Image (tube, rainbow, N blue to C red):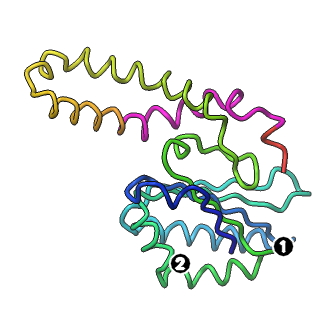
Amino acid sequence: MTDNQSGVGQQDSTSPLTVVVSRRVRKGQQDAFEALSSQMTERASRFPGYLGTAMFRPASPDDPEYRIVFKFRDRESLEQWESSEERAELLGQIESLLVQPSEREVTSGIVTWFTLPGQNPVAPPPKWKMTIVSWLALYPAVTLVFMLFGDVLAQVPLLLRTLLVTVVVMLLMSYVLMPRMTRWFAFWLFPKTARISR
């Protein structure tokens, strides 16, 4: 299995991680592959730190490539899953159905907010685009927090106030706002010409 983790080694080990696995399935084995993949997802969901999985089926009958995108809370929880017997048992069966070994890419930091299949390996949007879309989500989130809780926060010491605001805003960004913003701005973040390229 190819493991492309460019830049991840320098990332904070407590950052959420997104793993993108590309698998090219042999003709006629799609049903068996999808059944095993469902079992893999069900097993992963029982592990601490698991945040979700999405499977993207081949774009056309001529393209046998599946993309599986899954997320874990941090590197430690991801490593626990990837070194588990539960995963290893199914992984061997899955690999036997493939045209070639799986390809795997791990990303962390702000890139995990912009998960959309399109290239193999998945290429994040340009930094300036990610910055603009992040700001479009961040500005109303921070404004809303201060509108709703500004009077209460004004009575809290600065360090605690900053801690509370950043925790709330980061949770909103990661689990509510950015998944939606990524879908809404997909036409601009991931132009069609980029999404269909290999």
In the image, the segment drawn in magenta is 171-193
Where in the figure is residue 153, as x and y percent of width and height? Answer: 15, 22
Q: Residue at x 17, y 29 (%)?
A: 161
| Element class at badge 2 | helix
Q: Which residue is mark 1?
A: 26
Q: Amino acid at mark 1?
A: Arg
Is residue 91 placed above or below 169 in the rendered structure?
A: below
Q: Amino acid at mark 2?
A: Arg
- Taking the image as shown, residue 155 lies to the left or right of residue 45, namely left
* Magenta segment includes 186: yes
Q: Residue at x 43, y 61 (%)?
A: 50
Where in the figure is residue 167, as x and y percent of width and height? Answer: 28, 38
- What label does residue 175 carry, if any? none
Label 2 Cα neighbours within 10 Å, binned few <14 / some 14-19 / many ≥20: some
Lower position in the chain sequence, tag 2 or tag 1: 1
Q: Which residue is mark 2?
A: 87
Q: Quadrant of residue 163?
A: top left
